[in-house]
Image (tube, rainbow, N blue to C red):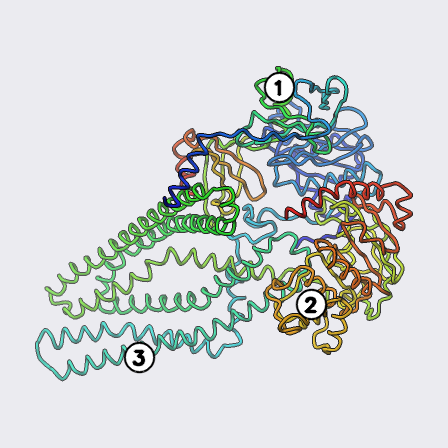
Amino acid sequence: MTTQTQIKVSAEGASPFREDSPDVVSAGVAAATEDDERVWIRVATDMADRDVFAERWLVITDRRLLIMHANGTQATNGAALAAVQQFPLSDVRAARVEPLVGGGRLEVERHTGEPAQVYYSNSLAPKFSEVAETLQQVSVGEEPTLATTVERSRCDRCHRVLPEKDGVCPACVHKLDTLKRLLAYMAPYRARVVLLLAILVAETGLDLLPPLITKHIIDDVLIPTANFPLLVWLVAGLFGLRVLAWGTAVGRRWVGAWVGFRAIEKMRADLYRALMYLPLRFYDKRKVGALISRMSNDSDLVEIYLIFDIPYIISNGLMVVGILGVLGYMSWELTLWVLLPVPPIVVASTLIWNRMEAYWVRWSAKWSRLTSHLNESIRGIRVVKAFAQEQREGQRFDRRNIDLRDVSVSAERHWIVFWMVTNFFMSSGVFFVWYFGGRKVLGESLTPGALMAFITYVWMLYQPLKWFGDFYGFMMRAYAGAERIFEVMDARSEPFQDPAATPMPQLRGQVEFEDAFFGYDPGKPVLRGASLSVRPGEMIGLVGKSGAGKSTLIHLLCRFYDVTRGSLQIDGVDIRNIRLEDLRSQIGLVAQQSFLFDGTIAENIAYGKPGVKFDDVLRASYAANAHEFVIAKADGYDMQVGEQGNKLSGGEKQRIAIARAILHDPRILILDEATSSLDTPTEAKIQQAIARLVEGRTTFAIAHRLSTLRSADRLVVLDAGRIVEVGTHEELMAQQGFFYKLVKTQQESSAMTVSKELES
Amino acid sequence: MTDVDQEKKIAGNGKVKKHTPTPITVTHPENVDVSKVRLYREPAWKLRLTIDGDRSYTRIKVVRAAPLSHPTRYISLLDAKDEEVCMIPDMKRMDEDMRQIVQEELDRRYLTSTIESVISIRNEFGTSYWDVATNRGPREFVVQNVAENAQWLGDHRLLLVDVDGNRFEIPNLGDLDKKSLGLVEMVL
């Protein structure tokens, strides 16, 4: 986990920004610096210049900045000890990163002379943006800070580059630990697991017996052509075994499913709980799609593994051992011949499976391209027709269709080859048995029935080996899936259970930002020292361009994130010390896109207070001006709003969300663009509802249309993470500063906005 | 006449009769003609741009409008606010010293590496690990889900984007040696 705490830069202790440098660099730094000089930062870049992938080192001490060569060629001519560039820290005028295509450049401007430039590939971009931030702090005379941790991009153990930052290294999955953890989910059902194992053993035994009986049929009935009663008994025995085998097969699946699905259910529940309690920061870095796939695909992998693969491995393992035992008992010489084709089968199947897998990946990629094209063109059919592109879409579809056909054909061909090769080796084993076994029968050291049994066993032995190659790959994927699931479960959740937190069941709503710094990405601060004091019950309008830090301020207030520097206090208590449950239960949020959950209107209004009386729901609904449209619906408050509330219009959803906030009765209310994208009569109704809601609560409102903030007690204007103006609408207009300019540009562009709205 | 026939006819007509587009005028603070623009370095590490020897800009950014399909044409000069000052339609029709500066600036911005040969490609768990020789020297990188992160820029030209967003280009698959080509074809 990447923690967000930042520490003051010091020379003591470990820091990810003091990397181990090669001797040449260390010697060079030692030669260039004084004895008591402290090294703050020592980092390597992977691009010595923009045209060479090679190491170069950037060293920052409390006195100077050095850029050093790392390779030996310069060392031989004695130049390595001299830095590429060095200058005193006091010479740094500004530092910033310039994002380039496929990499970036750290630019350190100086008061005198040529600026220093360090190129790096995109892999190191987070590191250097952090370094640039620190240098920038130094240049303006602030105390430099650095994050304590950086994202891991390589596996700590095998140094493979990780497929996901801070993710699981698929090669280093702790297989045994993961297996133990998986099996722990079955622990509550120990008795059934034991039963399952017993069934597996029984089943293997039952599968091994029939060839032995056919041996007797051949040797004792068919060859002497006598003893009809024995034949009846033996056939009855075969039938009996078959019935028992069916019984055990049913029993195995029955019990296996019972245990496996319960284990998976528990695991899914744990994963879901973990997801609910994780901090938002966890979600910032990950795509929602990836998380959902973790929930579905990864748990699917594990499910198949638990329910089908583990029993399959055990039963086939037992089978192989059993068959080898019986074969060895019947004739050890023949058994050796049987084993001869085993290594080639295993090797061939492993090799071909790897290639097969590549084809399947390709096949599914082509298939998804085809379906996404289909999806796109059908969804966008209006556009296709409006631009008369039916024919071209058809051609594009054909190309993808043909690609898919070609991949399917070559996948099938590989499959045929695989089938042929393994079967060739398998039948070659059978040929050995026929030949050498046949000779033994002629020499009367083996009965014909035993030979027949032998051949049956040989086929039974080879079957599981064929899938060996696939099996390993699948198992690894299942382990990686399980590891990804466990990774989420192990991530640190929000501190709901902090016993040291102050219980504050009744907030007054006094809010104080003091020199608050914050950035979602540690290298890019969004808030740069915001200070603001808000009285209980005051309504604050937040104004500024997008990216100025308005939403960030609000996220901090909800404690979705913590400030990196400075502080945020509510009623004089640091927000980090307030019991999270108390804080959240007294903050209400009405956002631009009201998110409703699948359920009835009444349930949605009561979301924050489940089990509340219907009278209260009604009261909230009246106050939110929602009642009139709700009763007009056929099912009234019992109407199902559909997934994400999609059966309601935007304005209706908004009013439900306001009713939800009113019923929640928060001390601090946040309106995030609550009235945008609504038509004027609806907006008037919602404004009225909001006015009722705001009454007596500390309110923070963000609105793009500045006119909607007229009722605010004070407006706070943000620009580039700083609060630049505070005052009433009139005061700020009179001041003719930032706010005045914003209002003017908005008036100018309003004509354009109208035309845009008409278009959409 | 069937729908398909009709479509064909419409498409056919479109090819024969090329209608002239309605002109659209763009108003922009600068948007000046490239002939009026001078690029120079003063001091040596600072790029400056003057228009008619009158207005001057520092912190000029030189970007390609279509870096993949038209690398030497449609070069845009942006000011510090990322607003376009002017567009160079074709680098070939510039005088030598200006072109050199533009080329230098482009080289400083586009860090895409060219793969010269492939030493190994391992495919594990749906992720491929590449060890290659590039025009910038040896490099290892990881591509997740090759099908998504390999972009064909032509029948034989390939662009790979690794997990960190670094870019690697194979300008012509045919120019690779046999071994490299075999490895690439294994994963694509």
Residue B188 visible, this angle: no
**Quadrant of the image occupied by residue B106:** top right
User: Going by the image, does B117 lie left or right of B78?
Assistant: left
Amino acid type for the residue under numbered disc 3: Leu
Q: Are marks 1 and 3 on the same chain?
A: no
Circles 2 and 1: CB atoms closer than 8 Å = no
Residue B98 locus on image (x, y percent) = 64, 18
Which residue is painted at 81% across and 36% down in the image? A139
User: Where is mark 1, residue-wise?
Assistant: B99
Q: Residue at x 81, y 41 (%)?
A: A744
Residue linked to disc 2:
A629
Q: Is residue B34 left or right of residue A222?
A: right
- Residue type, mark 1 in image: Arg
Q: Real-space Cα distance between discs 2 and 1?
A: 66 Å
Up the image or down, A272 lies above or below A554; here it is below
Residue at image mark 3: A244
| Crowd band around label 2 with a 10 angstrom C-alpha radius: few (<14), some (14–19), many (20+) | few
Q: Is residue B115 above or below residue B100?
A: below
The picture places residue B103, in percent across and down from the top left corner, at 61, 23
Structural distance between the alpha carbons of marks 2 and 3: 66 Å
Q: Residue at x 11, y 82 (%)?
A: A228
Assess whether mark 3 and mark 1 are in contact (beta carbons under 8 angstroms).
no
Q: Indicate which label's residue lies in the foreground, 1 or 3.
A: 1
